[in-house]
Image (spheres, rainbow, N blue to C red):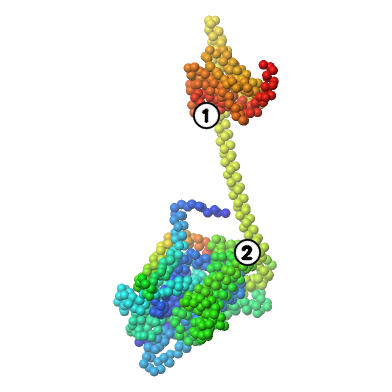
Amino acid sequence: MPKQQMFLERKGYRMRRLMDAVRLVPILGLGLWMVPLLWSHPDEPGGSVSISSALTYLFGVWFVLIGVVLVLWAKTRFIASETMAQTSDDAGD
Amino acid sequence: MVGLDQLILVCLAYVVGLFLVAFLAERAALRGQGGWLLRSPLVYTLSLSIYCTAWTFYGAVGYAARSGLEYLTIYLGPSLVMIGWWWVLRRLVRIGRSQRVTSIADLISSRYGKSNVLAIVVTLMAVIGVTPYIALQLQSVVLSISIFATTEFVGAADGVDSFDATQAAFLVAVGLALFTVLFGTRNLNVNERHHGVVIAVAVEAVVKLVALLAVGVFVVWGLGGGISETLSRVDASALGAWEVSASRWSALTLLSAAAFLCLPRMFQVMVVENDDERHLQIASWAFPLYLLLMSLFVVPIAVVGLDLMPDGSNPDLFVLSIPLSQGYNGLAMLSFLGGFSSATSMVIVATLALSTMVSNHIVMPVWLASRHGGATQSGDVRKVIIRARRLSILLITALGFFYYRASGGSSALAAIGTISFGGVAQFLPALLGGLFWRGATRSGALCGLGMGFAIWVFTMLLPSFGVDGALSGAAFEQGLLGLGLLRPQALFGIEGLDPTVHAVVWSLSLNTLSFVAVSIFSFPDPIERLQGAQYVNVLEHDGPARSWTASVAGSEDLMIMAQRILGAAEAQTFFRKGADQQGRSGGLPEPTPSFVQALERELAASVGAATAHAMVSQIVGGTSVSVQDLLAVADESAQMLEYSSQLETKSRELSETAEQLRTANDKLTQLSVQKDSFLSQISHELRTPMTSIRSFSEILRDAAVLSEEDKTRYASIIHSETLRLTRLLDDLIDLSVLENGQVSLHLGEENLGQVLDRAITTSLTGVEAPLAVSRAEEADEIWLRTDVDRLVQVFINLITNARKYCRADDPALQIRIGQTGQYLEIDFIDNGHGISAQAQAVVFEKFVRLTGSEGEGAGLGLAICQEIMARLGGNITYLPTQNGTAFRVTLPASAIARAADRKSEVLPAT
């Protein structure tokens, strides 16, 4: 049985952490997009968030997430594709 | 003003264009050209955009006008799913490819033991859930046409009447069905991609994006006066401030994410039409970007529309009516085409996906059951399947059309969309459970789906027809059958929830609960367990796919069946490949389990897993796999594990042996070096006395005149050298005898004091230089039982060494006795300056004489002492911590004769 290495050299280590980031980005996105749950409504005390700032916030998060995923894709496309290509080759025709 | 005729003309031209594009794509794919485009990630991402239907195109603006930013949830859910592709979509696509899945019903039924019941349930739920959605598309197209129609005939008395909405809807439905039949059923194998459809969908994706962006740009910069002005206008509008309820925000995001995974049309483009898993990775950022662009201008359009348009105009159609009211007919036309694209692409893919499900899971099983000959009959089944699929397309489109007619096309678009989402979201627990949990069972999935679906119908679908529509007002007020617990918008008496949140929370939670609970308490059959293991472990390995054990299947029968489904040429190619793999040239392959498995997968790509399984089992006969087989598979892997661990042990043993060999080799080499140096030492030691003997004897022989005195002197030199030689040879013989273990010990008993005295007397007799020797008195108390003469030899050696080498002014030797339980220790300590640390290491080696010491010894004395002590069962060591040179002779307790015995014998003698 091929044993998994416990410690990797620097490059492999960096790649592992990037793949961790790929896994964690959606959780970050969910957290940021659920922030509006905390905003108060106009009828509540403490003032409300104007629709333009709400709009700016939500779309800003959206842009940032797309940017992050894009960067991660550029950095990890090769390892992610390697693991995928193996099986897609024999699973396809 | 755009005329209705003009509109229809443009519309027709657009449709013809689409047909042309699809046709060209199909032809290119057939010729193997254009793969760079047809199989590109761009086309894949764009085809995902059928998520954005007319509901999104028109409805989002209406939604925003009515409920503010809540419309965004419909996009945020799918964006999160795409961004988190690594978690779910990657597995889904991998399974879709490795199991040749044809639809979401196929996936779920295949996961839960290729159960056709489950496939039928999922198919029916999908049809019921999606039909309103198709109706919605027809409605939006008709609504958008009617805008043009009413503006054209505005002022004319018969304006609205002259436009027959039903007829228009009918024509649109027929056109869409025709397109889907033409391009969606060209090939049977669903895994062979529908390039025509996909490329047409991609083109439509571009059209709707461009149209919406164009309207948005026009509204923001043309009417709104720039970004900041538009934003302040937004703040000043009725939308005002953030007013979305927290529960709706989270529930709708969850709902849209679930629907994105479960919608049959999304499954079709995302999993079934996926060509390369890497495209998914690119779509993970490209598709959220598309969604962002689609939703970017929704709020400005809604706000400007609310400002500009007269009260009572439908906000769902602002995208169209704003440019029209401003006289921008070209833009209005583009916007219309965008909406038309959204509607048509959705209908095409949805009917395609649903028709695959209906024909594979409902029509085919019925057809198979109705013919007693079963799958072995001759005749082409392919025609039957394709006909079934075409019929299903027509049927589903017709259903949508009738739903449209029945509902009257009045309700807001967003409401219908949410209801549809709620229906398909019920697949989620069974789907995710199947992907991640091996314990999920068919009974659990059936219960969960049934529970979720029932609650959805009761709390979402039926109430949508309005009070006194499908449910009476009494049922709303007092609950179904008068039971207060069964009120459609306050189940179990829990009130105060938003109706949508209420339905989503109750249906999904009870769905999940019953799915998990029943799964835990039911037991899966063997195929379920096998499939479950393959699904959950799909990323680790393409596991042993052994679901057929009997090899009684006749290859001929399988061949006949395969030909009827795959087509003669394809089936023959497949069988030839199988035969080649088995190493049989010519003829049919053996129906080995793996071959039958591969064949079943191939068939599954055409008719779905459940049907393919049923057909193969008709020929192979009986159950295909038993618990024993599963255990056998497990055994095999256990054996492999065992074997590999054995290998590991072996290799460890080997490396240990190698290490031992290496050590032995080192020792041998060292010994050989020692032997060489020993020989050269001996020859050196022998030669020195020999040389002087030879020269003095030559003098005696040759000298003519030699004084008596000289003669005596020379002869005595020769004599002493001979003595030295003899002593050396004696020592050597002694050592060799001791080393070879040939020595025999002469055991005797003697008092230790006497032994020491004898040694002292012998070593000091006839010596001028005095050595003061003091020995411990208690030595007289100790009786030894050992080879006394050899022991005396050791003592003599030590005392003589002290006499010879002690450089103190008043040389003195102290002999101490120590007794521990196991040993008797006799220490010889002089008052010299000791031996240096390096010298200590070699002092017991042969021929070692310390530098600065003179004398006639050959350097064998201590080596001999060591050997003797080893023979006597003790040892001799250098004691480093004393002031002078100190040696310790250790004797085992067994060498001490019992003092009590001795005393009785000795006392009378004295």
| Letter of the chain that mark 2 sits on in the rendering | B
| Residue in the image at 60% along x and 52% along y | B644
Q: Position of residue B520 (x, y in %)?
A: 60, 67
**Nearer the viewer's eye, disc 1 or disc 2?**
1
| Residue in the image at 49% along x and 19% along y | B807
Task: Check disc 1 and report the residue beneath it.
Answer: B841
Q: Quadrant of residue B442?
A: bottom right
Amino acid tagged 1: Ala
Q: Is residue B337 above or below residue B836?
A: below
Secondary structure under the numbered disc 2 in the rendered image: loop
Secondary structure under the numbered disc 1 in the rendered image: helix
| Residue in the image at 56% along x and 74% along y | B449
Foreground of the two, B503 or B139:
B503
Foreground of the two, B529 or B888:
B888
| Residue in the image at 52% along x and 29% along y | B841
Q: Position of residue B809 (x, y in %)?
A: 48, 17
Amino acid tagged 2: Arg
| Disc 1 packing (10 Å; few <14; some 14–19; many ≥20) | few
Q: Position of residue B559 (x, y in %)?
A: 64, 71
Count of picture labels: 2
Q: Could you tell me how far apart the alpha carbons at marks 1 and 2 are, in whole angstroms?
A: 70 Å
Q: Quadrant of the N terminus of chain B?
A: bottom left
Task: Check disc 2 and report the residue beneath it.
Answer: B546
On the picture, is B105 further left or further right than B11?
right
Foreground of the two, B711 or B92:
B92
Q: Which mark sits nearer the N-terminus, 1 or 2?
A: 2
Q: Quadrant of the C terminus of chain B?
A: top right
